[in-house]
Image (cartoon, coloured by chain):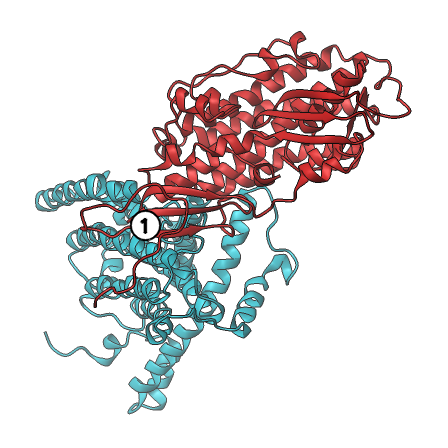
Amino acid sequence: MNALPASQTFPVTNAIGDAVRQLFPASAPAINTLLAIASLLALVAFLPVLLIWLERKVAAHFQARLGPMRVGWHGLLQSAADGLKLVFKEVLKPEGADSFVFFLAPILPASATFLIMAVLPFDHHLQVADPPAGIIYVIGISGLSVLGILLAGWASNNKYSLLGAMRSGAQMISYEISLALLMLLVVMVSGSASLREIVLSQQGTILDWWIFKLPGLGLIAFAMYLVTSTAELNRGPFDIAEAESELTGGFATEYSGISFAMFFFAEFVNMFVAAGLATTFFLGGFLAPRIGLAFFDAVVDFVPGFVWFFAKAFLVVFIYMWFRWSFPRLRVDQLMYLEWKLLLPANLVLLTLTAFFVIRGWIL
Amino acid sequence: MMETQEKISPPGFRTGSRSDASTEEYYLNMGPQHPSTHGVLRCVLKLDGESVVEVVPHLGYIHRGIEKVAENQTYLQLIHLSDRLDYLSSFSNNLCVCLAIEEAMQIGVPERGEYIRVMLCELQRIQSHLLWWGVFGMDLGAVTAFLYGFKEREQITDIFEELCGARLTMNFFRPGGSWADVPDSFLPRVRQVISRMKGALAECHTLLTNNVIFRERTQGIGVLPAATALSHGCTGAVLRGSGVAYDVRRHDPYSIYDRFAFEIPTGARGDCFDRYLMKMEEMRQSLAILEQAAATFPGGPHRAKERAAYKLPPGSYYSQVESARGLFGVTLIADGGPKPYRVKFRSPSFSNLSVVNAIAAGHQIADLVTILASLDFVVPDLDR
């Protein structure tokens, strides 16, 4: 394969990117990269604030109450105020904790989310980088957040933290297998491991999205992805690593101030990333939900792709929140049972069936 | 690296160290500040990985010497102290003290007064169970249950607030009745609660009881054999969950409980799920009692004529009631003066908690939380 042209290595070919290329042809790749990283930073900083507010509002309305109402319109600025408070709080380190590892740990999950955000195709030409093996990259990077949690638990010099970290390590490593197999399934049917190519392979109507295109199997795969990624995200009902009522704060027990905020922010951006990946794999990513009627399709095509991407991702985020505020927590051994005895065999069967479908050309 | 220092184990543990050294047992301090020890109970756990080898509960973090304080109060003044034991069944506790005083001084209670007592106690049983239901859900990780429990509980708490101004520590009953009559809005509001609670209970069952994760977490966990329950003095839902149909309201009827028809639910296995179901069923039975009482609620005075002084003749007086948590008993030892010589409260929480090590050993930390929640203790009731 020949070297990719600049427009493809840096697929930010929107109006701003084109303008930069015309004005500074020589230094355009550097400027465009910087712009992309800056906008990504802004997104990573803004998303948790929005998501935390959303989570609190969704939880509140599930629980017949209002949630934050005081700071800003319907408490919109509440999480910004909370974040500001956390920044100014003293960062405490427990006695006997390993300083270097203790302060390194919160950075890892945060950077992992940042790195995965870089390959999410927000729109057709709105993606910081599109490596041909994007999925392998995603699987590799997501391991970083496990590392952060494990290190946090170990360095805290606290038994609750250690228990939480060990639980989390076992959980995330187990569920990563299922997640990887589901991604493999998508790679198999779409014939590409690049995230943008996967989205483009779903062009057409709603029925061409992988959730519907694989007869029956797509829906099952999507449901399994939701369960697996919820576990991977350490969110309820699989939040055994934090398990407030058992381990007080789990791996984050000893963290305070900004280092706690890093974990907290990473958790919420991670949720968006998982939802974004679900959108990319199963819900047609930035593609508009066409249904085959000329008038309707014209209307949905008029809406820009990134709006569709965010709408779909937030729908999945809502499902994650729905899970969390409805179900009791599983026990550690039940969680392992679910993965190794139920999800993994089911995943392998699903993969085999899909392979059979692909070979026979039964994909709709 | 060589471990030169001899490991000192915390006090109270009965199991010795194991001979095989494949894994190392360690100790974990759970509480007094812990989200699921419901206050300031402290448990020291001996753990093997995630498995609980032994639990040693430590009490005393909220000991206020209430029994001693009661010795320095007159009989009327010490009624309010019983509010501060099990603050979720303060009506039952008040009633228990009043029953002992009434027995000693031969005070009768008018019909309306008896009805008020029964209805308030049953309302509070539902209120207490709703709070427990919410907390049980929260301990299992279902935070939404907590708010739903509190939402329904609020209806009943509002009735109490209108009645006596207090929402938690009522101090309402007096020897011979209660210090105030119920307001006119009492009966309509009780009827409203009855009709509302039926739907709410169905909602509770949908949210928790029928949830597969909830069942997995509670069924077969913390099995309490009936013999152990009896030998540890467990009462209330903990005892009934193990299959022993004992209820003070039926077997030693006080007030006018013998006039109402209600069932005593019993469990089959004695696990956390059975104890849970007992409480859920008790709420239904309390509603049945309330319905019957509301249908025949009489008029007339709410309190017998007040005495100039409440001085108990010398002797020992005991009374017991079925509070929301089990058998609550009061012993008053009187020397003829205006103050008791000795007061002893028998609290259900203390006896119910005593089985925790017997049923939690071998389970996991998460199960210990479930077991603690299913025993439904109130920490100020443990310590007194």
Parent chain of label 1: A
Q: Residue at x 75, y 34 (%)?
A: B78
Question: Does residue B193 show up?
Answer: no
Return the x and y of residue B76 as percentages of the image width and height: 80, 30
Dot 1: element: helix
In the drawing, does residue B110 fall left or right of residue B285? right
Could you say which is closer to the camera, residue A99 or residue A221?
A: A99
In the drawing, does residue B379 fall left or right of residue A124? right
Could you say which is closer to the camera, residue B345 or residue B283?
A: B345
Return the x and y of residue A253 as percentages of the image width and height: 43, 60
Could you say which is closer to the camera, residue B285 or residue B178?
A: B178
Residue at which label 1 appears: A231
Which image quadrant: the N terminus of chain A? bottom left
Q: Residue at x 80, y 14 (%)?
A: B106
Q: Residue at x 58, y 62 (%)?
A: A78
Return the x and y of residue B379 as percentages of the image width and height: 57, 40
| Chain B shade | red
**Quadrant of residue B80 within the rendered picture:** top right
